[in-house]
Amino acid sequence: MEQTREELALAVDEAAWGWLRAHLERGGLIVVAGELDIVEAGLKIAADDAAAIGAWIAGGKLSKPSAEQIAAWDGEKDRLFLCLIVSPYVLIQEKTAVPQ
């Protein structure tokens, strides 16, 4: 069953890096750039929209966490992220990078 924008918007939550680290270990974390709407990213991933996802990856708007990001976040376990579960992935977006 396809998820709606409203369902995904209601599923967006906040989590500290310390809580998200376990998802990194299993390879399920995807970083969503601040200029991209996390709900829109979730919709495209849920719909398996390869064209949009590929363009975002190529443009650096969707990625796996880099070693530098992981090291920085490990130093700040209380850093807050928006998160959205789109199984089997957990999309994260730094709170400071949320578009206004």
Image (spheres, grey):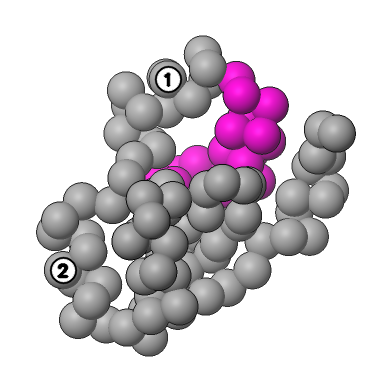
Query: Looking at the image, is mark 2 or mark 1 earlier in the sequence?
Result: 1
Q: Residue furthest front?
A: 26
**Residue 98 image offset from top left, x and y in percent:** 49, 59
The residue carrying pointer 1 sits among few (fewer than 14), some (14 to 19) or many (20 or more) residues within 10 Å by Cα, namely: few
Q: Is residue 93 visible?
A: no
Quadrant placement of the N terminus = top right
Residue ID at (54%, 64%): 82
| Residue labelled with disc 1 | 54
The residue carrying pointer 2 sits among few (fewer than 14), some (14 to 19) or many (20 or more) residues within 10 Å by Cα, namely: few
Compared to residue 61, the image places residue 81 above or below, namely below
Is 76 left, or right, of 48 in this rendering? left
Q: Secondary structure at mark 2?
A: helix
- Inspect the image, locate mark 1, and give the three-letter code of the amino acid beneath it: Gly
Compared to residue 50, the image places residue 4 above or below, namely below
Please state which of residues 19 and 81 is positioned toward the viewer in this rendering. 19
Residue ID at (27%, 82%): 76
**Residue 46 image offset from top left, x and y in percent:** 66, 34
**Residue 48 image offset from top left, x and y in percent:** 61, 24
Residue ID at (56%, 46%): 88
Does residue 96 show up magenta in the picture?
no
Q: Residue furthest bottom?
A: 78
Alpha carbons under labels 2 and 1: distance apart: 26 Å
**Residue 25 image offset from top left, x and y in percent:** 33, 61
- Inspect the image, locate mark 2, and give the three-letter code of the amino acid beneath it: Ala
Quadrant placement of the C terminus = bottom right
Q: Secondary structure at mark 1?
A: helix
**Picture quarter containing residue 85?**
bottom right
Q: Which mark is residue 71?
A: 2
Q: Is residue 56 visible?
A: yes
Residues in magenta, as a range: 31-49
Is 16 left, or right, of 48 in this rendering? left
